């Protein structure tokens, strides 16, 4: 009997374990990507991301998509982040000086764009709303440190019917 033969099965087991750990690691890393989804009662939030800060800016914006899977409209009415991350988070919309939203502004318009805080955003029954640059966004105010590419942070979204949904935002370079 060859004294080395027991080591061959051990080597195969070690290779199988390493391959299994690699699969688990890749699954874990992909769940933290911007394509991750977060679920609450009849609410699905996906594609949660923030743009990297320009210089030492102490504000930022979060973009995402909210889907309402129920037959009743819901409202997003609050957003919050840990106080150790930023002073506050609130729902904003980009608007033009003539009162239209950036998403409904006509081509060639010379209106000035600004942001305004909104009390809530209606998520239609069996529908969705996308928060994107030039439209709705979650404004981060009083960041403790500028947002950096690759960084992740928690954000709580409060819904009238769907409760609080905790999501993780991924920071991306411009």
Image (cartoon, rainbow, N blue to C red):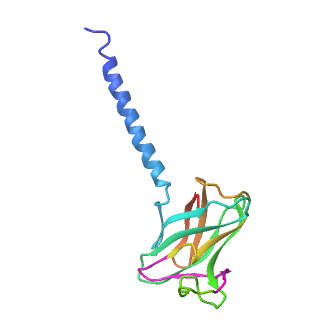
Residue 123 included in the magenta stretch of the image = yes
Nearer-the-camera pick, 80 or 174: 174
Q: Along the horizontal axis of the image, is 64 left or right of 142?
A: left
Nearer-the-camera pick, 84 or 115: 115
Q: Along the horizontal axis of the image, is 85 left or right of 103?
A: right
Q: Quadrant of the C terminus?
A: bottom right
Image quadrant assignment for residue 24: top left
Q: Residue at x 42, y 38 (%)?
A: 21
Q: Residue at x 31, y 17 (%)?
A: 6
Looking at the rendering, the stretch of residues picked out in magenta corresponds to: 111-129
Instruction: Check the image and report above or below for 139 versus 36.
Output: below
Instruction: Check the image and report above or below for 145 versus 5.
Output: below
Image quadrant assignment for residue 92: bottom right
Q: Residue at x 64, y 55 (%)?
A: 148
Q: Residue at x 59, y 89 (%)?
A: 100
Image quadrant assignment for residue 151: bottom right
Q: Quadrant of the N terminus?
A: top left
The residue positioned farthest toward the left in the image shown:
1
On the image, the x and y values in percent for residue 117 come to 67, 80
On the image, the x and y values in percent for residue 5 come to 29, 15
On the image, the x and y values in percent for residue 94 come to 62, 80
The residue positioned farthest toward the front in the image shown:
108
Q: Along the horizontal axis of the image, is 122 left or right of 21?
A: right
The residue positioned farthest toward the bottom in the image shown:
98
On the image, the x and y values in percent for residue 97 come to 67, 88
How many discs mark residues in the rendered view?
A: 0
Residue 35 included in the magenta stretch of the image = no
Instruction: Check the image and report above or below for 32 versus 14.
Output: below
Nearer-the-camera pick, 90 or 171: 171
């Amino acid at each position: 009997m060859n004294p080395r033969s027991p080591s061959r099965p051990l080597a195969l087991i070690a290779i199988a374990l390493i391959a299994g750990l690699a699969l688990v690691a890749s699954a874990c890393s992909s769940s933290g990507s911007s394509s991750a989804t977060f679920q609450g009662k009849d609410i699905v939030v996906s594609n949660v991301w923030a743009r990297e800060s320009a210089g030492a800016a102490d504000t930022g914006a979060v973009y995402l998509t909210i889907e309402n899977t129920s037959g009743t409209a819901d409202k997003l009415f609050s957003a919050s982040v840990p106080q150790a991350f930023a002073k506050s988070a609130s729902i904003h919309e980009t608007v033009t000086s003539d009162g239209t939203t950036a998403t409904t502004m006509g081509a060639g318009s010379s209106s000035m764009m600004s942001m305004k805080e909104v009390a809530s955003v209606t998520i239609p029954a069996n529908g969705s709303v996308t928060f994107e640059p030039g439209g709705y966004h979650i404004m981060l105010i009083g960041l403790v440190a500028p947002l950096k590419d690759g960084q992740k942070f928690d954000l709580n979204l409060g819904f009238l019917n769907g409760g609080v949904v905790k999501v993780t935002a991924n920071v991306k370079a411009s």
